[in-house]
Each structure stands twice: as structure tokens, then as C-alpha cells.
């Protein structure tokens, strides 16, 4: 009987396809998908430094021969573009470009040159079109047409889209940013400040001191007593903005001197001590050298600052002394932010030399050109120039020699796309 039952059970198992269950552990293992090899992760790319180019020009002036050459009789309008066309070619490569506006835009039709400037609004439009982004408006001619001239100049710059620093329309406007303009220079933040030594003897009323940023306490008399408290306070405010760099545009020095005086060098050292990374000077109407200085900063740490004492005139009708007042340069400052430390510095410096060509016998609209010296000389040598003759070619040679004597030949870009190492 037992044998019969065992046989019957075996037949049932075979017919139903059943087999003894596997152990639980075996079932769990068999349910796991087959192991797959993990791909190797790509290494994180090394962070890249941020590199940008800040270009700096000298004084933008419109003496009456300049204003008259900008006049277009057919339309009754003004156009400075022919004077600026060659510099505009360089400025195309700038991430940001700055200059000093040494005139006011107080409205026509009574335009004037030295000693009390008033220029057509077209100057601002064409400077913007040439590639400039910011103009310093603090200089000895800021008050040439009174306070209304200061205010209207700022209105016009706003209308054409040019940033400005150095003058204000109200105390509230000054207090809003402490007279500081923060700009994005190709991904590098720069806080710009601007000051002038004085106002050609004019004095601001006590309730209108907001109008122009002055760095001298005796700005209407002896011009020898810097307002260190204001400069220290303003640069502290700039440091608190935590920008990558701080730039001070400053109107200083002695006219027609090709070397800075002790007043400039002492003040430059103080500005760098208080946090300025760039000190960009103007007013002498002639070139003065640039250099990198090392000081002990406000915090006791050693720090460096790049100082350009003067770039002379950018556009003007000055010709005496020649060729100094007609020779200028546009600086090209390479700025680099280290991706690891976050520190930003001037890593390379170069300049392009220019000359304000006077063509008195030419028709209106063709009398004044700011020419790239190397480009103009090359075109003449190739027999392709419509602007340069034998006499003006000799002027260009003399201007280039003068430029090299003041700024050094090693920084001359010479039309190349390379820059010299910073000093």
C-alpha cells in the first residue's frame, strides 16, 4: 500500500511540472540582474581664467576748429565720425573703453572752445559710436557753462547711452553711489571713481559741492592741499562694493610737462595704498609715462597698482608744443582674474600711438583726423594714402619717436595683435 501511494505521488508531480522549491537565498540571487561595469567618470575641467581688455584714451576736446570741421552744411548738423574712424578700429577689440570728456554739452547754437568750452551733442553720440563706454566728467572745464552745463551734459550722455563718473545733478545722486560707477569689463567688475584738482578758479556754492568731485581742499586757490579724508572715505566705500578692481580717473599735473611731478607721484601712491588698482590720469595735454608701483596698503599688506600719469589729448586742436600736444595713445590693459585665487590683476600692457593730423588746406569735413601712426605711415609708404603727404609723414615720424621716448617702444602695439608684458 505504501509503495502504491509513493508511486501515485511521483506521477502527480511529473504531470503538473512541479519541482521542489529552491531555497529562499537561491531565489533572491537568481532575481538579481547581471552585474554591469560602471563607466569611468570624466575628470572635471580645469577652471579657466577670465581675461578682458580695458582701453583707455586721453582728453576729448572740441576747440572751435574741431567743431567747425565737424559741421555738415547740407544738414546743419555735426558729425565727428571722420576724426574718430581710425581709433574706432582699435576700440572694436575692447571689452570696455574710457576717456575724459574735457568739454560740456550745454546746448547750441552758441558753441565755443577755449577758455569756456561748449560742444555739440553730436560729440557724445559719435564718441559712443566709436566704441567708448564711459566718460570721466570731472575736470577743470566741468563748470565752463555753469551748473546747468554740468547737468545738461549728464542728460545728453544718458540719452546716447554713455556711462559717466565725476559729476552729479544732485546730492541724492552723489549719495546713491558715492560718486562710484561699477562696470562689467568683459566679466571683470571694476569700480570707477573720478576727480579733478580744480575748476579754473571757479568756486562751487556750499550747497552745490555735489556737482563735481574735487580732490583738493584748496581747489579754487593754491591747488596744493589734497582732501585725503574724502579720498580715503570714497575708496573705503569702493572696497566695500567688493569689485574685482578699483580704477581712479584723475585730472592732475602740470600742463605740457612730459613727466609727473611729486604731487602726482605722492597722490598716486596714496590712492593705491587706499585700494586703487588703476590710476588713470589726464590734464597735461601731453603724454606722461605709465608704471606699476608697489606700496603697503591700508590693511598692512603689500599691493601693486598700475599708474598712467597722462595720455595727453585724444582729439583736440592744440599744436603747441608740437608734436607733443598732437601725439597721443590708446592704452590696452589686459585684465585677468585667477580662477583659483579669485585675484584680478593687470597682466599685460600695450598702447597704440595716434597723431592729430591738421590739414588746413582741405575742405571742411576733411581738415582734422586722429590717425593711427603706424597705419598712416604704412599707407603712405605703399603709395595708398589720401591723407598723408611728405611733410605730414615727417610729422608722423617725429610723433612716433616722441611717443616711444615717453611711453617706451616695448609697449607699442605697432598694429600687431600682441601685447607687451606689464612693467
Image (tube, rainbow, N blue to C red):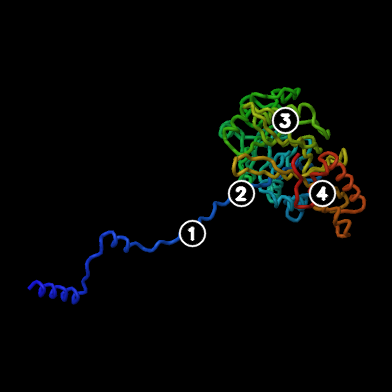
User: Which one is in front in this view, the residue at disc 2 or the one at disc 3?
Assistant: 2
Residue nearest the viewer, comparing 262 with 117: 262
The secondary element bearing badge 3 is classed as helix
- The numbered mark, 1 or 3, whose residue comes first in the sequence reads 1
- The numbered mark, 2 or 3, whose residue comes first in the sequence reads 2
User: Gap between marks 3 and 4, in whole Å?
Assistant: 34 Å
Question: Which residue sits at x=11%, y=73%?
Answer: 3
User: Gap between marks 2 and 3, in whole Å?
Assistant: 32 Å
User: Which one is in front in this view, the residue at disc 4 or the one at disc 2?
Assistant: 2
In the rendered structure, are the residues bearing label 1 and label 4 in contact, judged by CB atoms less than 8 Å apart? no
- The numbered mark, 4 or 2, whose residue comes first in the sequence reads 2
- The numbered mark, 2 or 1, whose residue comes first in the sequence reads 1
Q: Which residue is mark 1?
A: 39
Image quarter of the C terminus: top right
Task: Establish if 130 lies above or below 238.
Answer: below
User: Gap between marks 1 and 3, in whole Å?
Assistant: 58 Å
Name the quadrant containing residue 295.
top right
Counting other residues with Cα less than 10 Å from the Cα at mark 2, is it few (<14), some (14-19), or many (20 or more)? few
Question: Which residue sits at x=40%, y=61%?
Answer: 35
Counting other residues with Cα less than 10 Å from the Cα at mark 4, is it few (<14), some (14-19), or many (20 or more)? many
Q: List x then y, in percent, for residue 209.
A: 64, 28
The secondary element bearing badge 2 is classed as loop
User: Gap between marks 1 and 4, in whole Å?
Assistant: 68 Å
Q: Which residue is mark 2?
A: 48
User: Which one is in front in this view, the residue at disc 3 or the one at disc 4?
Assistant: 3
User: Gap between marks 2 and 1, in whole Å?
Assistant: 26 Å
Q: Which residue is mark 4?
A: 368
Amino acid at each position: 500500500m505504501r509503495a502504491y501511494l509513493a508511486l501515485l505521488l511521483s506521477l502527480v508531480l511529473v504531470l503538473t511540472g512541479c519541482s521542489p522549491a529552491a531555497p529562499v537565498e537561491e531565489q533572491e540571487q537568481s532575481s538579481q540582474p547581471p552585474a554591469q561595469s560602471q563607466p569611468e567618470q570624466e575628470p572635471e575641467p580645469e577652471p579657466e581664467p577670465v581675461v578682458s581688455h580695458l582701453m583707455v584714451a586721453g582728453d576729448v576736446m572740441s576747440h572751435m576748429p574741431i567743431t567747425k570741421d565737424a559741421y555738415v552744411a547740407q544738414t546743419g548738423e555735426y558729425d565727428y565720425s571722420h576724426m574718430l574712424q581710425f581709433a574706432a578700429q582699435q576700440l572694436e577689440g575692447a571689452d570696455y573703453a574710457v576717456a575724459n570728456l574735457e568739454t560740456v554739452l550745454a546746448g547750441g547754437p552758441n558753441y565755443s572752445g577755449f577758455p569756456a568750452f561748449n560742444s555739440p551733442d553730436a560729440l557724445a553720440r559719435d564718441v559712443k559710436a566709436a566704441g567708448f563706454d564711459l566718460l570721466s566728467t570731472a575736470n577743470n572745464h566741468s563748470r565752463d557753462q555753469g551748473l546747468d552745463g554740468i547737468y545738461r551734459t549728464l542728460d545728453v550722455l544718458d540719452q546716447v547711452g554713455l556711462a559717466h563718473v565725476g559729476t552729479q545733478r544732485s546730492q541724492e545722486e552723489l549719495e546713491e553711489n558715492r560718486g562710484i560707477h561699477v562696470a562689467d569689463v568683459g566679466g571683470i567688475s571694476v569700480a570707477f571713481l573720478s576727480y579733478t584738482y580744480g575748476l579754473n578758479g571757479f568756486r562751487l556754492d556750499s550747497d552745490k559741492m555735489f556737482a563735481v568731485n574735487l580732490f583738493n581742499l584748496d581747489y579754487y586757490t593754491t591747488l596744493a592741499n589734497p582732501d585725503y579724508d574724502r579720498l580715503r572715505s570714497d575708496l573705503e566705500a569702493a572696497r566695500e562694493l567688493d569689485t574685482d578692481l578699483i580704477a581712479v580717473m584723475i585730472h592732475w599735473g602740470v600742463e605740457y610737462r612730459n613727466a609727473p611731478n611729486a604731487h602726482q607721484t605722492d597722490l598716486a601712491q596714496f590712492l593705491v595704498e587706499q585700494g586703487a588698482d588703476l590710476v588713470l590720469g589726464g590734464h597735461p595735454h601731453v603724454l606722461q609715462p605709465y608704471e606699476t608701483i608697489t606700496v603697503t596698503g591700508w590693511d598692512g599688506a603689500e599691493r601693486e597698482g598700475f599708474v598712467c600719469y597722462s595720455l595727453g589729448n585724444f582729439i583736440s586742436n592744440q599744436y603747441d608744443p608740437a608734436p607733443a600736444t598732437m601725439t597721443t595713445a590708446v592704452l590696452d590693459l589686459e585684465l585677468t582674474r585667477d580662477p583659483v585665487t579669485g585675484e584680478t590683476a593687470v597682466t599685460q600692457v600695450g598702447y597704440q600711438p595716434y597723431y592729430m593730423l591738421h590739414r588746413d588746406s582741405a575742405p571742411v569735413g576733411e581738415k582734422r583726423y586722429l590717425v593711427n601712426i603706424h597705419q598712416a605711415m604704412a599707407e603712405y609708404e605703399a603709395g595708398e594714402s589720401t591723407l598723408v603727404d611728405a611733410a605730414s609723414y615727417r610729422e608722423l615720424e617725429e610723433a612716433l619717436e616722441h611717443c616711444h621716448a615717453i611711453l617706451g617702444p616695448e609697449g607699442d602695439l605697432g598694429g600687431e595683435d600682441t601685447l607687451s608684458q606689464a612693467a
